[in-house]
Image (cartoon, rainbow, N blue to C red):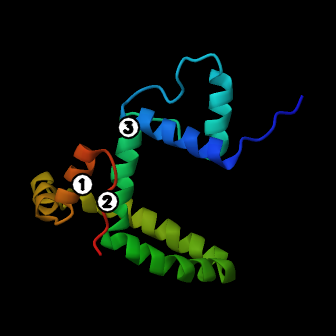
Amino acid sequence: MTTARPSAVERLAASRQAIVRDMNGEDPVSDNADGEESKDVIRESGVNASSGSWGLVKQVAASWWRSHPAQLALDVATPMMQGIAERHPVKMLGIAAATGSALVLLRPWRLISVTGVALALLKSTELSGVVQSMLRGGPPDRPR
């Protein structure tokens, strides 16, 4: 038995309903007679039906990572590292092993106090954006 795909209007309506339910903290699919059909429409429309605090944590972390300076460094280093890994995989493995060994032996995390990390976090200009994002329940607006 094949079911017809919902039209674009039906998918849009289902998406809107799922967003409203998610924002209200309700179950994404109501207890109606055609609940299974609604689930299929929502699933095909691409709406993420999961809600709750884990989704909020993921959104906050994603918005924080987008503006983090290390993200830019990672974006720049990734293509370069991929090229080296393709040409010299054994050398790359050796470098990774040496770096891991140095981290274990030198224990650089013992050089930084918890207070220093807390102060650095408080001085961060992005802390206010993360707090606002948590209070609002979504990623902060990007500066224009």
Task: Check if mark 3's residue and mark 2's residue have beta carbons within 8 Å.
Answer: no
Instruction: Give percent across and percent down for residue 143.
Output: 28, 72
The residue where tag 3 is placed is: 23
Task: Check if mark 2's residue and mark 1's residue have beta carbons within 8 Å.
Answer: yes
Which amino acid type is marked by label 1?
A: Val
Q: Is residue 47 visible?
A: no
Q: Is residue 20 visible?
A: yes
Q: Quadrant of the N terminus?
A: top right
Q: Quadrant of residue 122?
A: bottom left
Alpha carbon separation for disc pair 1 and 3 = 19 Å
Q: Secondary structure at mark 2?
A: helix
Which amino acid type is marked by label 2?
A: Trp
The residue where tag 1 is placed is: 130
Instruction: Give percent across and percent down for residue 6.
Output: 72, 41
- Between 98 and 82, the residue placed more toward the observer is 82
Tally of numbered tags: 3
| Mark closer to the chain start, 2 or 1 | 2
Q: Is residue 109 above or below residue 125?
A: above
In the current view of this chain or complex, which residue is farthest to the right?
1
Q: Secondary structure at mark 1?
A: helix
The residue where tag 2 is placed is: 64
Q: Residues within 10 Å of mark 2 (few under 14, many from 20)?
A: some
* Front position among marks 3 and 2: 3
In the current view of this chain or complex, which residue is farthest to the front?
9
Q: Residue at x 47, y 75 (%)?
A: 75
- Between 122 and 133, the residue placed more toward the observer is 133
Q: Quadrant of the C terminus?
A: bottom left
Give the left or right position of residue 45, taking residue 143 as reference.
Answer: right
Q: Residues within 10 Å of mark 1 (few under 14, many from 20)?
A: some
Give the left or right position of residue 30, taking residue 88 as reference.
Answer: left
